[in-house]
Image (cartoon, coloured by chain):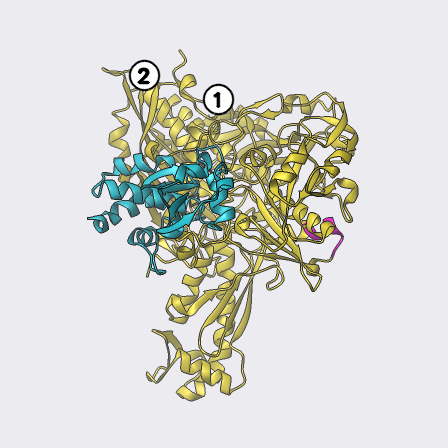
Chain colours: A yellow, B cyan
Amino acid sequence: MMNWRNDGVAKVTGKAKYADDIKLFDMLHCVPVYSNQIHAEIVEINTDSAQKSSGVVKVITAKDIPGVKKFGQIRKDYALLADDKIRYEGDVIALIVADTLENALQAVAKVSAKYKKLPSVLTTEEASKDKILIHDVYDSNLINHHKVRKGDIVKGFAECDIILEDFYETNFVEHGYLEPESAVCQVRDDGVIEVYGSMQHPFSSRRFTAALLGKKLSEIEVITIPMGGGFGGKDDTAAIVCARTALAAWLCNKPVKMTYTREWSIKESYKRHPYKMNYKIGLKKGKIHALEANIVADGGAYTSVSPWVTWRSTVQCGGPYIIPHVYTDVKAFYTNNVYTGAFRGFGSPQVNFAIEQIVEVLAEKIGLDPITFRKNNMLRQDSITVSQQKLDNHIVSLDQVLDKVIKESNYSDKLTKCSYGKSDDSKLYGIGLAMSYRGCSLGAEGKDFTSAIINVQFDGSILLEVSIHENGQGSETAMINILAKELGLPFSKIRYRRSSTSSIPDGGTTVASRGTLMGGGALMDAIAKLKLIINKVIAPKLSCKPNEIIYQNNLLISPSEKSVTWEEAMSIMYQNCTYPYAFGSFEAPPVTWDEECGAGKAYFTYVYSAQVAEIEIDMKTKKLKVLDIYAVHDIGKAINKGLLSGQIYGGVVQGLGMALKENLIIEDGHIVTDNFHKYRIYRANELPRIHDFVIENPDPNTPSGAKGIGEPALEIISPAIANAIYRATGRRMKKLPMLMEDICKQ
Amino acid sequence: MQAIINRKEIKIKKCDLDKQLLTFIREDLNLTGTKNGCNIGVCGACTVLINNEPQRSCKLKVSDIIDKELLTIEGMSENNDLHPLQKSFLDHDAVQCGFCTPGMVLTAHALLLKNNNPTEAEVRDAIKINLCRCTGYQQIVDSIISAKRFYK
Ligand code: FES
Ligand code: FES
């Protein structure tokens, strides 16, 4: 029964109903209207002729919004329907609601608008001058500025015997979830607005929807349904699509569906932040002694979660190394590009791409192999991080993951076989390694708590509900796994209840690889409470003390081996008029942060990872082949090995895409790569097998011992590949994606 | 005019001939297991089998199935019993978000009908027409190879 997931049968048979699969009686269809502008003032929007178009029920513009017009999780700067200004090509100026999708699409071209073009700001250099402001309510294009100030940077560099300066750069990356955004909404007979959407965070969808309609949270019910992938990308945009659909349903008083095309999705949805990173780093007697980093992120037209994404980059800017003197600035700026936000990895893949190459350059400068250099410098038990956190509350296992990946990949032997640009035939071979430490869950980014409900029925069947969202990663299954184990029951007795925002309290978004960790914490709390309730009633029947009962093999057993079956026990509960029902919650252990010097207990625990990539480059055919990937992660505790491996493979492959393939091309603010024929993601025949290994040091800070894996798997593959390319060709690639045409450039 | 859809003969109306096959399957037949991921024939989420060949239904018209056998994911399991290939997908954790799964299962089914002893490379080559953003493909490949014994 290991390989079982609660939504598995529905998904392999095609029965699973995603948002676009839902049809409601008398349902209307809604489509967005874009402006085709990049930066412009809206002078006038004329919807008359669209309104008269065949089948059109309503054309909605900003003036029809009954509630709040602007949204954002941090800064409320995103207009759900643009009314004063266009800030990027994905801004929506109107919604068309019609009886059929065809009729709605027909009317799009009939919306006309007059604009006053404004000069556009397409680079962070331009943005930082503040000559043209993207949002005039703020007096600068600077979204945020995070700092790390540790030690004495001037003195630090003065003491160094080797100083290296380098520049690295990364690109916009598209999430590429296979299911584009979609939502279906209806106004129920009790007045509640019901939302079914492809989204990662039901509670932020509810918040956006309630605010847009000027309603209370209790008047909106967002219901969880299967979702075709998110990877961080179905937070803001997806919530916005839900809110717009709800607006249409409310104004037309009929069920409405809005499903995005791939082109709309790529045009409008936020991307991974492109980074420009200037690093200066100094060694003193072989030890990293000083680090100065100046990092700039393109936030695009809106804030989204840029301040949180870039905050993670501060904590991870120096990699998993001990560095006494640090001076880092991380800034995000508004531009007129597509906005950027949450994406699996969340500000760490970019800095890892830089730092994990830099350490290898440094090692070579002083004639050390990359492993010895890392071991001389890496964080160990009780080490202090760049943000001045002492790692003393969990096992710091960098040495374990590193040793394991070296052994499994046979790294040291293979290192001697690398080509460095020279070979007898056209083929070059290289092996590369990278490692990281990654803070778990939200850290000082935000409030971090979640809840779980166990509702046992009197026939012994169980309804379980946890306020984290199933994104496809199998979080529901992982929760069932935990509950089954703790109660000694088969999975078949547990039904994961499709939760809604009306049935369980807000548990925060399923991001930051926090699902298993936080949800598991709340669930363990609920289990403890449930057992207290049950034990009190059952103990007399078993002639033992309440805390002596053991749950095993569908039985409740006393120390003297007296037992009742689970079903008998629940029937006794019924006779006794006691509900076997428990509500559990979990709050992440406290974290602290001092914004001025970038110091504090940034995260309550860390995941440790090391990965190795082997590649072959054929200079004749100009092809790069990834031969093998080895991934080792200390994830605390594996709840479900199959799902865990799936997260590793999926994360590694997305990381490979970011490293070698995925190139979102923006010309003058317009995204050119508007569908999968131009924006290429990996296909099965282009990939090697991935060898994954987990190390388990159960985390004392989380009730289930689990940490998280979704993001660690992705965050170090691009530097591992870059290091392999260097060892194959002798060339350092400092820009993502690393395309063959650049690798082969003479 | 007719077509055999999931083993049943279905009359096709003349006015439907020019419809996009994907829309016809999802909207007219209500078989929503067939997904739309790109609508331009590159992602494979809309894959169906026509005379046991994987085809992208977003690139076809209803006229392309006249007098042919169409199999959608709903036709893979008879009487609510999972097909061994579907079971194999579950046994190998080859399903995450599940959006690519229907197309993936059908492409794999077509391969195994033709070649019941494929190598890993042959499996990877066959399913290259189906994108998956979640799994990295590895568990999908394993599940297909392991299911080959049911096709002998
Ligand atoms: S929807 Fe047909 S190939 Fe993508
Ligand atoms: S499982 Fe999500 S796209 Fe394949």
A85 displayed left or right of A270? right
A467 displayed left or right of A68? left
- Where residue A227 appears, x then y in whole percent? 51, 49
Query: Any magenta on residue A536?
Result: no
A647 displayed left or right of A59? left
Magenta stretch, residue numbers: A209-215
Quadrant of residue A488 within the rendered picture = bottom left
- Where residue A347 appears, x then y in whole percent? 54, 37
Examine the rendered structure and indicate whether residue B105 appears above or below residue A490: above
Query: Residue at point 30% right, 42% down?
Result: B110
Question: Along the line of sight, which residue is nearer the eye, A673 or A635?
Answer: A673
- Where residue B92 appears, x then y in whole percent? 32, 51
Residue B1 circle label:
none
The N terminus of chain A: image quadrant: bottom left
Residue A619 circle label:
2
Quadrant of residue B126 within the rendered picture = top left
Disc 1 target residue? A164
Query: Residue at point 25% right, 38% down?
Result: B120
Query: Residue at point 67% right, 50% down?
Result: A246
Chain under callout 1: A
- Where residue A471 appears, x then y in whole percent? 50, 50
**Residue type, label 2:** Met
As helix, strand or loop, the secondary structure at mark 2 comes to loop
Chain under callout 2: A
As helix, strand or loop, the secondary structure at mark 1 comes to strand
